[in-house]
Amino acid sequence: MRKLQFTEGEYYHIYNRGNHKKEIFFSEADYARFLFLVLFFQAPFTIYNISRSVSAFLRKGSFGATKSTIQEITKNKIAELVAFALMPNHFHLVVHERTPNGISRYMQRVQDAYTKSFNTKYQMIGHLFQGPFHAVHIADNEQLLHLSAYIHRNPNELRKWHAKEEKYLWSSYQDYIKNNRWGNLLNPQIILEQYENQREYADFVKTSGTKDILDNDHFIETDTN
């Protein structure tokens, strides 16, 4: 049984990594599928033709969802996505608990759906992730701000993306400092409304001592690929 009990209205750092620290994303299609799941599974609806949506994203940069679909998800969220970063062997999310057991239901669907697809695609069996997802309650506003900065700086650990994290496709950082690609499927306002503009937030991310603050308290996984 999970020791942490989720509380409606609170925010949480949700994270997990591959079993034995192995990679969980082998291709851009894998990243796109997981991203689709964390965006569209915020409401407890059955989603069909996920592979078609992933293919559309890889071709056009959009999952091609209709306005009515996004509106229905927005109205019926059981958990709300605030920030994310998908890395080769782990992921980080900031999620708002909207309804009782919302995050637990949301993450179980995301991980189960992704694992099933991954194992089928690569002809694997067994656990993809290192057990159930991990969760840390975000105790106050300062922790929320620094955690968002830490998550958005994560891609900086990748050689290919060093000092270019604002261009990393599989993070919400560009949605914070440029245009929000996902509309109501991503809600950064609780963080952005505390800054004069997007540039001020970007400066905070670049200059904060976030990594030093969080290293002792949170899951840290350094990638050098």
Image (tube, grey):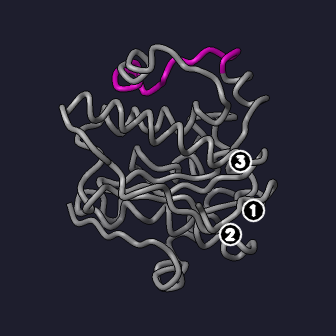
Magenta range: 56-69
Label 2 vs label 1, nearer the camera: 2
Report the side of 92 relative to 8 (left or right). left
Q: Earlier in the sequence, mark 2 or mark 3?
A: 3
Residue at 55 percent of width and 67 percent of height: 149
Task: Name the quadrant of the N terminus.
Answer: bottom right
Crowding at dot 3, Cα within 10 Å, few <14 / some 14-19 / many 20+, comes out as some
Q: Name the image quarter holding residue 220.
A: bottom left
| Extreme residue in the front direction | 1
Say if the magenta span includes residue 199: no
Q: Which mark is residue 93?
A: none
Under mark 2, the amino acid is Ile
Report the side of 113 relative to 190 (left or right). left
Disc 2 secondary structure class: loop
Q: Earlier in the sequence, mark 2 or mark 1?
A: 2
Under mark 1, the amino acid is Glu
Q: Is residue 165 visible?
A: no
Say if the magenta span includes residue 67: yes
Query: As displayed, is residue 188 above or below residue 157?
Result: above
Q: Name the image quarter holding residue 89.
A: bottom left
